[in-house]
Amino acid sequence: MSAPGRTTLRTGADLAAARLTAADDIAEMDRIGARYTIAVPPALAGLIDRTAVATDPIARQVVPDPRELETGTDEQADPIGDGAHEVTPGLIHRYPDRVLLKLVSACAVYCRFCFRREEVGRGGNMSRADLDRALGYIRDHPDIWEVILSGGDPLTASTGRLGDLVAAVAAIPHVRIVRIHTRMPVAAPERITPSLAAALRAAGVATWLAVHTNHARELTPAAREALDRLAAAGCHLVSQTVLLRGVNDDVETLAALMRALVEAGVKPYYLHHPDLAPGTGHFRVSIDEGRRLVTALRGSVSGLCQPVYVLDVPGGHGKVPIGPDAVVPGADPPAVRDATGRVHASPAWRRSR
């Protein structure tokens, strides 16, 4: 690993100077970057093993790969169907009790597997008029209990803008939860200042941060301190992880990550099956592989460390859990399978009082 530099790497030349690609590959890196934006912040660049960049799990997530320009026949620009549920510009109402607000299109790091890679990093942050329309829609729909801030990474917005937005959402009587999806505590932990953490809280709502992290090495001392600042301000912390080939697709790596999260005060929430985003086929594992990993995880680590394995159904049909089911179908008497695969049955499970 290398000491981090002071600036975010954004071009092929930057990557070559940081020894993350060869000088001969600069033009190819720039060609990929012209399609899918590049940004490798110092906190992540400094974690990469320069002697094994091609296989380093942090590098695989952030350094462009020529295979990104190969689009599979099943891959889609909008793989989870945001567009089918966009009710005002940048506001997605897919589930009855919650909406997702795409506040910004910028991120501190552009992950090479991002499911919104066709829109992030291209400018076009939500305008004041569109934000007002979105807030009006939320006010007019009393079934909305939770507002999710996403993008892009919403914590790239200014502290003042974030504070004003959280306060505006908190002023809507039927909204009780603000959830923020972010990679910032691991990508740029210095951004998580006490003043930013305080701006994310407002009377009348509980603030939850879903921290996106995919490998235990991302939870550096600086990242843990950033998480501590968020918790000290009263934010509740959960995690989101994407199951990625070559990054975390073995039970030892997943277990280390989930334990590191719990140790840092973050409850593992979702383990996402990779979406069918363009140029991401080299990251994909099969559902069967994922189910085997989740089964092994269940048998080896604490219940606190168990995320829900989910798939976003293409076309906008929402998330479904795809983890293994312990119940043995059709068994009589009713039977379950434990983490080692042994089957246990009892007639008592057929009765209710």
Image (cartoon, rainbow, N blue to C red):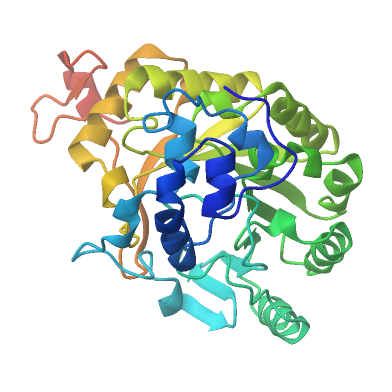
Of all residues shown, which one is farthest toward the front? 24
Instruction: State the residue at coordinates (43%, 14%).
Output: 301
Would residue 326 be seen by someone viewing this image from the given angle?
no
Instruction: State the residue at coordinates (64%, 62%).
Output: 106
Instruction: State the residue at coordinates (91%, 46%).
Output: 195
Q: Is residue 24 left or right of residue 345?
A: right
Residue 324 location in percent, x, y? Answer: 25, 33
Residue 149 location in percent, x, y? Answer: 65, 60
Residue 127 location in percent, x, y? Answer: 73, 81
Rendered view: 35 above or below 178: below
19 or 2: nearer the eye? 19
Marks counted in the figure total 0
115 or 313: nearer the eye? 115
Which quarter of the picture shows residue 43? Answer: top right
Which quarter of the picture shows residue 224? Answer: top right
Report the quarter where the C terminus lies.
top left
Residue 223 location in percent, x, y? Answer: 70, 30
Report the quarter where the N terminus lies.
top right
Rendered view: 263 above or below 76: above
Q: Is residue 3 left or right of residue 259?
A: right
Q: Is residue 88 left or right of residue 302?
A: right
Would residue 223 be seen by someone viewing this image from the given angle?
yes
Instruction: State the residue at coordinates (32%, 70%).
Output: 315
